[in-house]
Amino acid sequence: MAKVNPGKFLNEVKVETAKVSWPRRQDVVRTTIMVVIMTSLLGIFFFGVDSAFSAIVKFLLSLIG
C-alpha cells in the first residue's frame, strides 16, 4: 500500500472540495420539504393498505372460527 503524505492528502482534499458544486440553501430547503411531503404521503398510503389487508384477514378468519 502506498504511503501518502498527510499534507499532500489534505491539499488534494481541498482541491477536490473546491470542484464540488454545492446546492443553494433554497434548493436544499425545497428538496427537504418535498422529501417530507412524499414520505408522509407514502406513510399514509401504506397505513391504508395495511389497514385494508388487516380488515380482510380478520374477516376471513371470522368466517373460519
Image: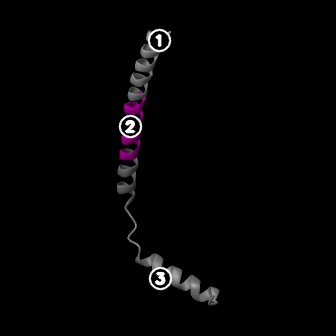
**Circle 1 residue:** 64
Residue under the point 36% across and 55% down: 26
Residue sitting nearer the eye, 61 or 27: 61
**Circle 2 residue:** 42
Which stretch is magenta? 34-47
| Above-or-below relation of 39 to 9 | above
- Mark pair 2, 1: CA separation: 33 Å
Please identify the quadrant where the N terminus is shown. bottom right
Judge left or right: residue 8 versus residue 17.
right
Residue sitting nearer the eye, 58 or 64: 64
- Mark pair 3, 2: CA separation: 40 Å
Residue under the point 42% across and 29% down: 47
**Amino acid marked by disc 1:** Ile
Task: From the image, state whether disc 2 or disc 1 is nearer to you.
Answer: 1
Residue under the point 41% across and 41% down: 39
- How would you classify the magenta stretch by its main secondary structure? helix
Q: Are marks 3 and 1 in contact (CB under 8 Å)?
A: no
Q: Secondary structure at mark 1?
A: helix
Q: Earlier in the sequence, mark 2 or mark 1?
A: 2
**Amino acid marked by disc 2:** Leu
**Circle 3 residue:** 15
Residue under the point 64% across and 90% down: 3
Q: Earlier in the sequence, mark 3 or mark 2?
A: 3
